[in-house]
Amino acid sequence: MHEEEPMKREKGEFLENLYGKLSQDQPGQKEELRYHPHGQLSFEEIRSLDEKYILPTYSRLPVSFVYGSGEFLYDSEGREYLDFLGGIAVTSLGHAPADLIESLTRQADMLWHTSNLFYSQQQVLLARALVEINFPGKVFFCNSGTEANEAALKIMRAYGQKKDKHKFKIISLLNSFHGRTFGSMSVTGQEKIHGGFGPLLPGVEYVTPNNTQELEEKAGPELCGIILEPIQGEGGVLPLEKEFIQKARDICDKHSALLCFDEIQTGMGRCGSYFVYQQLGILPDILTMAKGLGGGFPLGAVLVAEKYCDVLAEGMHGSTFGGNHLACAVAYEVIRTMESRKLVDEVRSKGIYLAAGLKRLGEGFPEHIVGIRGLGLLQGIVLNERLEARRLVEKALDEGLVIGRAGKHVLRLAPPLTVRQASIDQALGKLKSLFSKI
């Protein structure tokens, strides 16, 4: 594996203002970066203002990050963390990569927003790049993953309605996650996401993942589309079987329905190819993407296969902010950087290395870990059911490690694609320390 120089930036004026060095308490003691209140709030001040002014829709962890570089984060007290969550698989090139900063700054000096009433050089260059790394078709830009899936649902329904007004059924999977707007929430197969909102989008049915018989039974002439994640993210980092995905493809072909792959979390190189479907050899009709696409800048996109580019006509869908100049300039630089550095190839080798290390970790703690699953740099640690993932995520912060959870009993790891082997080793060591203290 190619080993790169550490990606940490030199401590410049920003950090000098943010942190102050305290005098050494004892001779020979290493100086530490500590919080210095130079225009910055303390953690307690941040938490207090959050409770007062922000809707309580998140169960936040007890930390506020103020600075990041590469695979490292620093909190408001100056403590360093190794980031193996990446903003939930978003900061694909790490924190504050120089190329993205340069691209964003250059575009910010020129133009931010004009709306989709006008042509955009940034949009067309990015759209061309997305088609070139995928399949012939056309792109719709939006702001997020849930918006991308909303557009996909409208395409499925519009396609079905053109054929027959009774053709409106959409099949999704149990334990799936497609977003929190009403349409995307309706095809999310988790009751905890549905609760408290009353009737959802009609015409949606759920199928157990990898159950081909159930999939066949619920399909029929009224089917207009199937939406699935090749690897369920929030559902526990659960890869779908190739045979099941192929059956979904065959059913859509049989019933003149559209197959949508939600690769919002698995896409943009995360799993060792630009998108997981490329490893399966099964083409979707619709591909949704977001998260790593903008490297941390909000952007979503839908790629529609050439055959179905006329389903949405002028005026049938739109977005004020979608594909603005800033977002598209940054996303184009993400792809350019990935191509120039051959990051997809790196992810394959790094993913194998990480998975092997996690397997050894599981063998060392069989009473706590019942399995490892995932692909590339999206890996899940399946816990014994007596262990709560949330509790371990909190404990990992004490080790200086940022990880996530995917369901109640699965830890989720999604480090930057640029993560170095030394940092993988460091993370594995922190995980070992974490499990040894249970």
Image (spheres, helix red, strand yellow):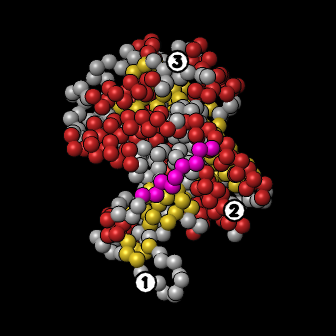
- Nearer the observer, 5 or 405: 5
Amino acid type, callout 2 = Lys
Instruction: Please tell me in which quadrant of the rendered image residue 249 appears.
Output: top right
**Residue 2 in magenta?**
yes
Region in magenta: 1-9
Horizontal side of residue 51 vs 173, given as left or right: left
Residue 409 in sight from this viewpoint: yes
Closer mark to the observer between disc 1 and disc 2: 1
Q: Badge 2, how many Cα within 10 Å: few under 14, some, many 20+?
A: some
Tell me where residue 389 appears, x and y as whole percent. Answer: 62, 58
- Can you identify the residue that label 1 sits on? 23
Report x, y in % for residue 122.
30, 31
* Front one among 187 and 341: 341
**Residue 432 numbered tag:** 2
Q: Is residue 50 above or below residue 319?
A: below
Q: Earlier in the sequence, mark 2 or mark 3?
A: 3
Q: Kindly identify the residue that appears in the image at 32 percent across and 45 percent down.
A: 102
Say which element carries label 1: loop
Cα–Cα gap, marks 1 and 2: 33 Å
Task: State which mark lies toward you, 1 or 3.
Answer: 1
Q: Earlier in the sequence, mark 1 or mark 3?
A: 1
